[in-house]
Amino acid sequence: MRKPGHRFLAVWLLVPLLLTFLISLDLPIPQKRSIYMDRNLIVILPGLLLLASVGLARWRRGLPFLLLVVTAVNLTALWFQFHDPQFYREGWRDAVAAVQSDWQDGDVMLITPSDLLPIWFYGGFDLPNLLVDLSAEEEEIAAQMTAVSADRVWLLLISNNANPHGFPQDRNQAVKEKAATNNYHRWLSANGSLLEEKTFPGITLTLFQLN
């Protein structure tokens, strides 16, 4: 990039990306969160397009090869997104189907208000449910569950992707660990028998028989 304008375009593209990366690092500071969002990165779009046009103008002879490389990279990324289970979105369809296949009259499912929409969307609108606050303390849980007239209780736990860079490993590991640390899971384990536990992408589904 010999021309100052070209260097400016490179700075326009790289500086926002570098800042986004640094700000999103998992550092022990207050109010920490990832900022990988389209509204934060859209500022680089004009610089990216102008820089791409400069490159295309210079690489006319190598344009077919460049297009082949870009296509190969995108197809590889898409293949991993759609065929590698660790990249799958939350498995709501399979989770709801698993509940419906083993549902018995008198069962109840513990969910949070934010779980209602995906459950209804995938056909679980007829499943009796109890809206709960998963951060509730043991005394509140005991009072709530004592009022439930059900022999079997389904517990649905969701683990969102909390990795600051969007990598799925953190979410998938959290799915395995969340059940052991959840207060409802602990109470149900102490006051009932574990009948079944299934794990889907981003979701842990557990069935208990109350004592």
Image (tube, rainbow, N blue to C red):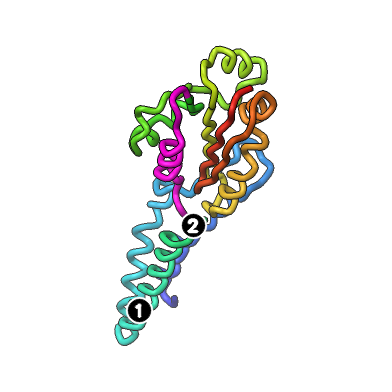
Residue 133 in picture, x, y percent from top left? 54, 23
What element does badge 1 sit on?
Answer: helix
Residue 195 falls inside the magenta stretch: no
Q: Residues within 10 Å of mark 2 (few under 14, many from 20)?
A: few
| Residue closest to the eye, 58 or 28 | 28
User: Residue 182 at x, y = what percent?
Assistant: 63, 32
**What range is drawn magenta here?**
87-106
- Please state which of residues 127 and 172 is positioned toward the viewer in this rendering: 127
Q: Are marks 1 and 2 in contact (CB under 8 Å)?
A: no
Quadrant of the drawing holding the C terminus:
top right
The answer to whether residue 34 is visible is no
In front: label 1 or label 2 = 2
- Above or below, 174 against 1 in this view is above
Is label 2 in a helix, a strand or a loop?
Answer: helix
Side of 119 where 110 appears, left or right: right
Determine which residue is flagged by label 1. Answer: 68
> What is the spatial separation of the Cα atoms under label 1 and label 2, in whole angstroms?
27 Å
Q: Which residue is at 35% across, 27% downward?
A: 126
Mark identifier at residue 85? 2
Left or right: where does residue 110 sit relative to residue 67?
A: right
Q: Residue at x 61, y 49 (%)?
A: 173
Position of 58 with respect to 108 (left or right) is left
Above or below: residue 195 compared with residue 69: above
Amino acid, disc 1 = Leu
State the image quarter where residue 92 is shown. Answer: top left
Task: Pick whichever, 81 or 52, lies toward us.
Answer: 81
Q: Is residue 117 visible?
A: yes
Residue displayed at 63% across by 48% down:
26
The amino acid pointed to by label 2 is: Pro
Residue at 35% of width from left, 29% of height from top?
125
Residue 136 against residue 81 in the figure, above or below: above
